[in-house]
Image (cartoon, coloured by chain):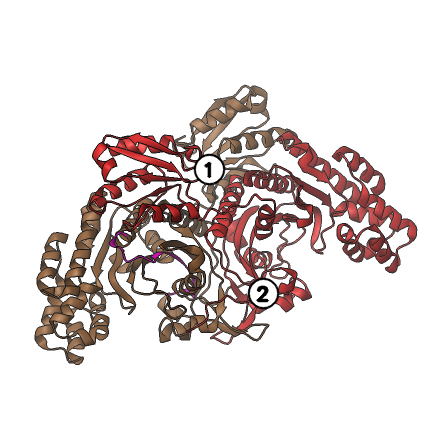
Chain colours: A red, B brown
């Protein structure tokens, strides 16, 4: 006998988890589509040379790689950005530009599981490539907003900055050539604190005055207009810096125009994002009630997506929803769900010779748009209802011999145990109408 | 520069293909859920011992396998049944029985691509385990029916048989101990023809009379009642055979009770399904207009799902939609689609200083449930509309300086080039109502 077990760092999704994930994926799909992003998919396996050297040394090390049947060196994708770069270079002529895609798929990283990370997880990316327009930047912000709102999160903040603002400030401080190191240090501010970052910057040879200016910048907070005014002062006459501030002003104005609540959009000069390839707007987003979770949706603008695969420059902007992190956060906030069934109604079975009637009733309810589970065996009613309650069904429809004889039915709320009698006079249409009219309020039956 | 390419046997899904696949996945999800099947997911990678020796020698050979970072021998799943067996054994106590799950996910097989097969494809399985009830068998047939109908296929046949009928006939012919070989031969009937199968059976030492009886059985055709009568004669007093015939009678009666059109359900004694583990009902389904495509949805009942992982017997019944084969078939029948966008409406952009107005209009249309792509740059209108038409947008909303000044808009049908003028008097609500009222008929604008 073989022991049934999953690999370390991998996990099964049981119905409650799988349903929660499908709900968010469905919402993401709907929101991405509502802006015209189109789905694509790429293989889980790529030529190793497509994947290596694209992320960091760490992602190279974490790569699942092997030699396939044909002697090819292959790897499993570790993110959706590198495959998208390869995809865009390969198909750009067919696709046309600008091109907007979403991609929701599994990725694999042989991470150290002691950090509570999984080796298999989903990413939900969306990107617009082939345009440098600020409208695409704004759209990224709006999509993230609509997405988090549609998921049902009330209190969240989208924190936005622009790499050009950072570059402008560094230029003014004479640190333009040390941008990478300085940004990596600033990026640690939230986790490591100001003192540690100041020490790290000093260690890089940044003068005390410049360190103070950088921390002042990172500490700017308040209403967007105030923060933007502070940044305008700090970038001075740096053209790059001013372009960055102007870009952020457009974001604030555009978000206000479409009614994004002001408290959900924050200009946060401390957001740098560690990755080198961002060149314009950068974005992170947080649950206000659980900021320690970290960013649940992050992204930004990059100058060139696919420079390793094509000479055609493909500027773009996009973000990625960390769906597994978000679901963990919702669970921690008590907003998770333990419902194990996608169906609203449980139809009990206990008169074997009435099988055709049960089948007709179930079929009619389904045709009316109600998901119905019919228990497959005429077992004891208590046993059936116990399983239905465990699975989180909201309501159970009970029709036994007596009910069939009198043309009635019991609609039972499995949480409150309250029952409603339906008189359907043996007319399935009447029964369906009665059940459907209770649908929205099955909880309150 | 690295050449952007996919591995042999792997492919990218561009938007038109990805949209077609998402449409079918979405329908499958909805139909499976409507019967109470709940989603699950399992890892792409499993311990090698979980995967090997479960399918056939061929699947063992085709397995993508390697040694992971921790020195574990691992493999990529080649179907969803073996991982489900492992999953069920591992979690059965949490899940409760009967348990109904669906699983739609990617699998990998290092197949010979010369047969036009891909090495990466999706499966969409659903199964009910923990019950031997014929209601679960019937439900499988109904789900397959509802699924194919919901996909929009008009002409299809679900061909059903029962392994017990075959066993009964073999028992009567004194061939019970050679069942596997005989069934494998019979399974080739459609492809190889009666003569080849007769020769193969004779080669196995089956007497001429028995060969004739087997071929007579396989050739039984016509209305279910007639075929069932013929089978009843052939099985005689074999208890197993009679149970099989009774099971098929229940399927026919149940399907009729819920209104499955009679021409879509065929009792086909030639259906054996090569796999050894089926023990009761077996099912295949075909597009009537493209039978050469082969079965697009197949399944059956098995005595024990997870005998290799647990001592608890887990009988079950289920089927799998071959989504990639189905999509290829629909395309071959001219029922594919070349639409590359999920959005219904294209909003052109050509008055840069009206950006906030465009944004407000797009947001209001989205709030009304319309998916809208807003072009990110105020380029020449002709260029924007050309891209929109290429992508398959049904309609474009055009509001230039003059339209803003007069409170009008042009709603253009991109297929017919016909235009409708909307008077919205600068009131976005009026514009949204007008566009939405054209929604269903955007094609006919």
Q: Which residues are magenta?
A: B117-135
Q: Which residue is mark 2?
A: A50
Q: Is residue B406 left or right of residue B22?
A: right
Quarter of the view holding residue B226: bottom left
Location of the N terminus of chain B (image quadrant) = bottom right
Decide: few, some or many residues near mark 1? Use Cα within 10 Å; few <14, some 14-19, many ≥20. Answer: many
Element carrying mark 1: loop
The image quadrant that residue B92 belongs to is bottom left
Count the marks: how many?
Answer: 2
Residue placed under numbered mark 1 in the picture: B344
Q: CA distance from mark 1 to mark 2?
A: 35 Å
Residue B423's x, y, as percent? 50, 20
Name which quarter of the figure residue B375 lies in: top right
Residue A422 seen from this side: yes
Label 2 CA crowd tier, 10 Å (few <14, some 14–19, many 20+): many
Chain identity of mark 1: B
Query: B341 and B156: which one is in front?
Result: B156
Residue B329, disc: none
Indicate the position of residue A298 as horizontal and vertical percent values.
65, 48
**Placement of B190 over or under A302, stated as above or below:** below
Q: Quadrant of the C terminus of chain B?
A: top left
């Amino acid at each position: 006998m073989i022991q049934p077990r999953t690999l370390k760092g991998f996990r099964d999704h049981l119905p409650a988890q799988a349903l929660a994930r499908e709900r968010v994926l469905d919402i993401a799909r709907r929101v991405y589509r509502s802006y015209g992003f189109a789905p694509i998919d790429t293989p889980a396996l790529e030529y190793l040379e497509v994947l290596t050297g694209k992320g960091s040394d760490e992602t190279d090390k974490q790569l699942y790689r092997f030699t396939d049947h044909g002697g090819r060196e292959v790897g499993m994708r570790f993110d959706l950005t590198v495959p998208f770069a390869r995809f865009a270079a390969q198909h750009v002529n067919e696709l046309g530009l600008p091109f907007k895609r979403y991609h929701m798929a599994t990725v694999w990283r042989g991470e150290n599981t002691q950090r509570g990370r999984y080796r298999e997880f989903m990413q939900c990316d969306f990107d617009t490539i082939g345009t440098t327009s600020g409208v695409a930047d704004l759209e990224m912000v709006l999509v993230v907003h609509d997405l988090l709102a549609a998921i049902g999160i009330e209190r969240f903040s989208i924190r936005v900055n622009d790499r050009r603002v950072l570059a402008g400030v560094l230029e003014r401080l004479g640190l333009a050539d040390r941008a990478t190191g300085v940004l990596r240090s600033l990026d640690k501010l939230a986790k490591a604190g100001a003192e540690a970052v100041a020490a790290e910057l000093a260690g890089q040879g940044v003068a005390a005055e410049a360190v103070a200016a950088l921390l002042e910048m990172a500490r700017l907070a308040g209403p967007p207009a105030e923060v933007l005014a502070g940044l305008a002062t700090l970038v001075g006459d740096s053209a790059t810096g001013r372009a960055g501030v102007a870009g952020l002003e457009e974001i604030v104005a555009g978000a206000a125009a479409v009614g994004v609540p002001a408290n959900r959009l924050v200009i946060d000069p401390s957001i740098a994002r560690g990755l080198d390839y961002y060149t314009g707007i950068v974005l992170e987003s947080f649950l206000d009630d659980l900021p320690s979770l970290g960013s649940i949706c992050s992204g930004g603008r990059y100058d060139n997506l696919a420079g390793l695969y094509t000479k055609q420059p493909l500027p773009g902007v996009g973000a990625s929803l960390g769906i597994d992190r978000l679901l963990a956060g919702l669970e921690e906030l008590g907003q998770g769900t333990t419902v194990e069934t996608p169906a609203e109604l449980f139809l009990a079975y206990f008169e074997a010779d009435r099988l055709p009637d049960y089948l007709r009733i179930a079929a009619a309810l389904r045709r009316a748009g109600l998901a119905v589970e019919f228990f497959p065996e005429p077992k004891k009613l208590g046993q059936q209802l116990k399983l239905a309650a465990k699975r989180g069904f909201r309501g159970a429809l009970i029709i036994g011999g007596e009910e069939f004889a009198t043309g009635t039915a019991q609609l039972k709320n499995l949480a409150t145990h309250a029952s409603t009698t339906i008189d359907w006079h043996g007319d399935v249409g009447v029964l369906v109408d009665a059940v459907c009219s209770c649908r929205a309020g099955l909880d309150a039956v």
